[in-house]
Image (spheres, rainbow, N blue to C red):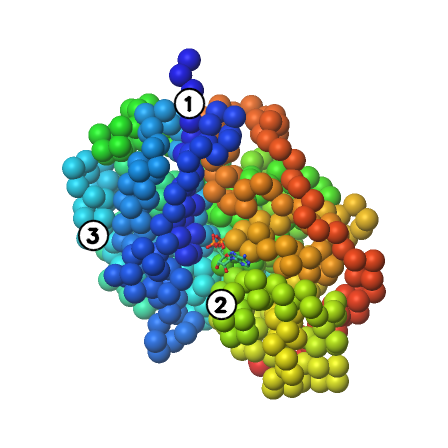
Amino acid sequence: MEERTFLSLDLSTQQLKGVVVSDKLEILNKASVNFHTDLPEFRTHGGVIIDKTNPHYITAPSIMWVKGLDMLLDRLTMEGVDFSKIASVSGSAQQHGSVYWVRGINNTLGNLDSKEFLHVQLATSFALSNSPVWMDSTTTEQCRELEKAVGGPTKLAEITGSRAYERFTGSQIAKIYHNKPDTYNRTERISLVSSFLCSLFLGKIAPIDISDGSGMNLMDIHTKEWNQTLLDACGPDLAEKLGHPVPSNTNLGPISNYFVERYDFKPDCKVIACTGDNPASLMGMRLDKDWIAVSLGTSDTVFLWLSEPTVVLNGHVLCNPIDKDAYMALLCFKNGSMTRERIRNNCCEGSWDTFNHLLDSTPRGNFGHIGLYFDTQEILPFLRGDYRFNKTGPVNKFTSLEVEVRAVIEGQFIAKRAYAEDFGFKFDKDTKILATGGASVNKSILQVLSDVFNAPVFVQEAADSAMLGAAYQAKYGLVGGSYNALLSSLPDPELACQPYSDAAEVYGPMVNRYRSIIKELVKCCK
Ligand code: ADP
Ligand code: XUL
């Protein structure tokens, strides 16, 4: 039998990446399109547009993502991909963002001309040209309304897995309905970024999967159905606009004819539901109970497998993309790589080598300095701006570049540990950390992670866990069976760093100090 392959795409904040894997799930081809540098005509910074008058208002042009897909498929072609061998396609995408399709969209998607680019044909298909993305935080008012509709934040967290968050899709949709009722009325369907990507491949609007769907503050994570009270609190006829949610590994049927004719996909190549990047990362990382995953990308996230849902006010419980009866815990920190890059640019002229040299040359604990850096409105804690402290209290500036470099990394990881403990994560001698995302290639950064958590850090051969997770989903959605058995031939994660023996002594007290600092700052900023 001819060897079959699988394609997956990851539509993240800064780029669109694609990978083709073999039947044994080995990487065969890869390509990527960077929105900022490859598509400069959309004038994004890091893939997003920050409004000039309101820095909390953050969007991305929906058509830029479509043009990115045209470009990526051409790049994969140049990489020598034989699309006729691909048995199924799936994908992952930044969570929470929403895409507003005009009426008649299924007709357009189902009748695309294979001689033309997608972006030319879909140029007028969006009722709202710029999609609100996960970095946006303009919907505080709508969040309070959503919580009120069901009896408060704890009740909302009980139903949907999270209290109301600005970036979650429900409050974003409510804002569009209230501020732009014409746009809302012109919208036939609303997709998440993941189901938008899936719709392009499917040639009709694809359903939202339950894992990404649980990042909307609209779905009951117990029944996996929309909660009507919450839908009504956001806008009229929302159930029809969203469609019915489906399990993440659902086989949605054959690929659209457009791809068969233009790229030579087989007509029976299947499209498997796409999901959010954090659920997809969980699939790519094969976690079991002693493991905590830390993803260091545009956003930093911490997540793990949960058998039962818990109710938390800081953090999220999402439906599990592998086992529809299980859950996953997620903590998201908005100021990840972009903030590390800012400090690298200010202190090290843009060089990671210099950054690492300075990081390695400072002691664990940074002589009692603590730095907190929030370029955009942070989620955990809800703060914006830079805050620096020496042993005795707040300071405007640190005395050296190396202190600043260590402060940004220690501050970010101490926050992760503090919020993970609040979520109920139990750290003990068996705890292991699996690191992924762009910054997980950096050993000096991983050493600080290992010390702050006092646990060994492991990495996988390929750091793109979301994209790989979606590639595994492409096969899993097609063949079914046991997920672990499907992945059994893949190599185990490699040990990257071990904590130093004084790590617990240094960072235990620092985590406590961090908690007191945050308590004061949040009080002052209210
Ligand atoms: P996304 O979340 O958008 O998918 P990635 O996980 O691909 O992003 O991570 C991209 C980020 O990785 C870049 O913004 C960059 O700062 C970071 N990165 C890449 N190489 C390094 C490195 N050597 N050290 C630290 N960070 C790095
Ligand atoms: C998760 C979150 C981010 C995005 C980034 O809640 O907002 O991790 O998924 O891609």
| Total marks in image | 3
In the image, 256: left or right of 417?
left
Name the one closer to the observer, 26 or 229.
26
Is residue 36 in view from this perspective?
A: yes
Question: In the image as oriented, which residue stretches furthest toward the top?
Answer: 1
Q: How far is the residue under mark 2 from the one under mark 3?
A: 37 Å
Helix, strand or loop under label 1 = loop
At 60% across and 27% down in the image, what residue appears? 489
Helix, strand or loop under label 2 = loop
Q: Are marks 2 and 3 in contact (CB under 8 Å)?
A: no
At 55% across and 74% down in the image, what residue appears? 347
Q: From the image, state whether disc 3 or disc 1 is nearer to you.
A: 1
Which residue bears the numbered disc 2? 350
Structural crowding at the residue carrying mark 2, measured as other residues with C-alpha within 10 Å and reported as few (<14), some (14–19) or many (≥20): some
Q: In the image, what residue type sits under mark 1?
A: Arg
Is residue 164 in view from this perspective?
A: no
Mark 3 or mark 2, which is nearer the start of the sequence? 3
Q: In the image, what residue type sits under mark 2?
A: Gly
Helix, strand or loop under label 3 = loop
Which residue bears the numbered disc 1? 4
Mark 1 or mark 3, which is nearer the start of the sequence? 1
Which residue bears the numbered disc 3? 123
At 30% across and 65% down in the image, what residue appears? 43
Where does the image place residue 164, in percent across and percent down from the top left? 52, 62
Q: How far is the residue under mark 2 from the one under mark 1?
A: 42 Å
Where does the image place residue 169, in percent across and percent down from the top left? 43, 57
Q: Which mark is residue 498?
A: none
